[in-house]
């Protein structure tokens, strides 16, 4: 292996499969030797040639291999080795999946919502479904959305203050949130007429005409049907993760260090004691960290 000590350290530190890792690195070695550079320094065109020639026989194999190489480049950057972003531009089926299942930015999410729901200015109940998905992008966990109250939406600070945490309120989301906070009635459009129905009085943002607090299962079902009818393949969790990656990318562009520590801690709490008994909490955290950084690298490759 080219730079064998470095690559061995990567395999050991990330607890990657030794056989798989060494096999991948042996494949890239001739190209590294020819260029006199480690693969983390190779340009996109060379890496794409390697992928097409050696990793492209099966989509799943190619995707997992490129994810492994992206993880290696990320690790090299963390260790201070010279590295470029060539591997993130290598095209795979994984990148196409990212484009179908995730969004790139608030503007991208707005385009999706405009495709699926009626315009905010029509003053229909669709505004609360828009808010539901904007809260996903902002980072709220799904069960939290129906607990958010009108007085927790701060338009001055552009924040949602809920559960002792602050979540960003994006400019594109303002019209939907203003209506959801202020509307006392919703319009129901019919091909032959428009009917206005009084909205249930209450303090919760996510409320319709029948109750002060809607059920998350009802909202999820309505959104899933709307997505399916419009051939949109998003979910609440994918939109939420898109928001996490978007904010990480914005921070990275400003020179800040990217970390997913909060998300990792959240996942470990959810897992409780369900992970394998031979996996310590630290090992689980390391595995999750690698997964998040790999997915983040794929998200960047697909959208930036």
Image (cartoon, rainbow, N blue to C red):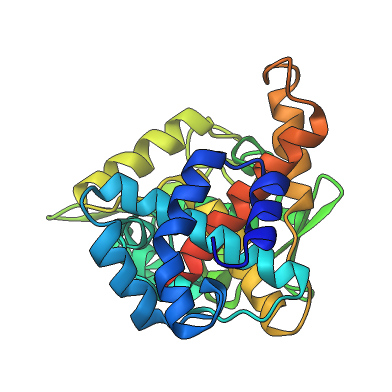
Q: Position of residue 69 (x, y in %)?
A: 50, 60
Q: Position of residue 119 (x, y in %)?
A: 35, 68
At 33% across and 46% down in the image, what residue appears? Answer: 61
Judged left or right of residue 161, residue 99 is left
At 55% across and 69% down in the image, what residue appears? Answer: 173
Q: Nearer the viewer, residue 219 or 34?
A: 34
Q: Is residue 275 visible in this depiction of the protein?
A: yes
Q: Nearer the viewer, residue 264 or 68?
A: 68
At 62% across and 79% down in the image, what residue appears? Answer: 83
Q: Is residue 281 above or below residue 82?
A: above
Task: Tell me which corner region of the image, top left, top right, bottom left or bottom right, holds residue 277.
Answer: top right
Judged left or right of residue 156, residue 193 is left
Q: Is residue 263 above or below residue 109?
A: above
Q: Nearer the viewer, residue 219 or 64?
A: 64
Q: Quadrant of the N terminus?
A: bottom right
Q: Position of residue 170 (x, y in %)?
A: 61, 72
Q: Is residue 63 above or below residue 275?
A: below
Residue at the outermost right position = 164
Task: Tell me which corner region of the image, top left, top right, bottom left or bottom right, holds residue 55.
Answer: bottom left
How many circles with numbers are drawn on the protein? 0
Judged left or right of residue 160, residue 194 is left
At 62% across and 43% down in the image, what residue appears? Answer: 145
Q: Nearer the viewer, residue 251 or 288?
A: 288
Q: Is residue 184 visible in this depiction of the protein?
A: no
Judged left or right of residue 194, residue 113 is right
């Amino acid at each position: 292996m080219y730079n064998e000590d470095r690559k061995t350290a990567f395999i050991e530190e990330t607890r990657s499969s030794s056989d798989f890792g060494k096999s991948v690195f042996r494949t890239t070695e001739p190209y590294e030797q020819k260029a006199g550079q480690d693969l983390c320094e190779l340009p996109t065109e060379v890496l794409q040639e390697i992928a097409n020639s050696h990793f492209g026989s099966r989509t799943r194999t190619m995707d997992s291999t490129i994810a492994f190489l992206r993880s290696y480049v990320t690790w090299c950057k963390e260790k201070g080795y010279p590295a470029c972003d060539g591997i993130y531009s290598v095209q795979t089926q994984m990148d196409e999946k990212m484009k179908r299942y995730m969004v790139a930015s608030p503007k991208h999410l707005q385009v999706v919502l405009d495709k699926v729901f009626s315009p905010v200015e029509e003053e229909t109940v669709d505004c609360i479904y828009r808010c539901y998905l904007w809260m996903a992008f902002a980072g709220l966990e799904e069960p939290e959305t129906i607990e958010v109250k009108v007085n927790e939406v701060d338009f001055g600070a552009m924040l949602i203050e809920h559960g002792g945490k602050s979540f960003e309120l994006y400019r594109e989301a303002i019209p939907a949130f203003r209506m959801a906070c202020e509307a006392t009635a919703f319009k129901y459009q019919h091909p032959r007429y428009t009917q206005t129905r009084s909205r249930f009085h209450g303090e919760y943002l996510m409320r319709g005409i029948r109750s002060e607090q809607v059920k998350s299962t009802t909202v999820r079902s309505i959104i899933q049907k709307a997505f399916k009818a419009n051939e949109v393949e998003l979910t609440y969790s994918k939109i939420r993760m898109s928001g996490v990656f978007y904010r990480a990318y914005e921070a990275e562009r400003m020179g800040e260090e990217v970390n997913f520590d909060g998300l990792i801690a959240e996942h470990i709490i959810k897992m409780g004691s369900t992970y394998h008994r031979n996996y310590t909490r630290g090992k689980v955290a390391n595995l999750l960290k690698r997964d998040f950084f790999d997915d983040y690298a794929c998200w960047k490759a697909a959208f930036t």
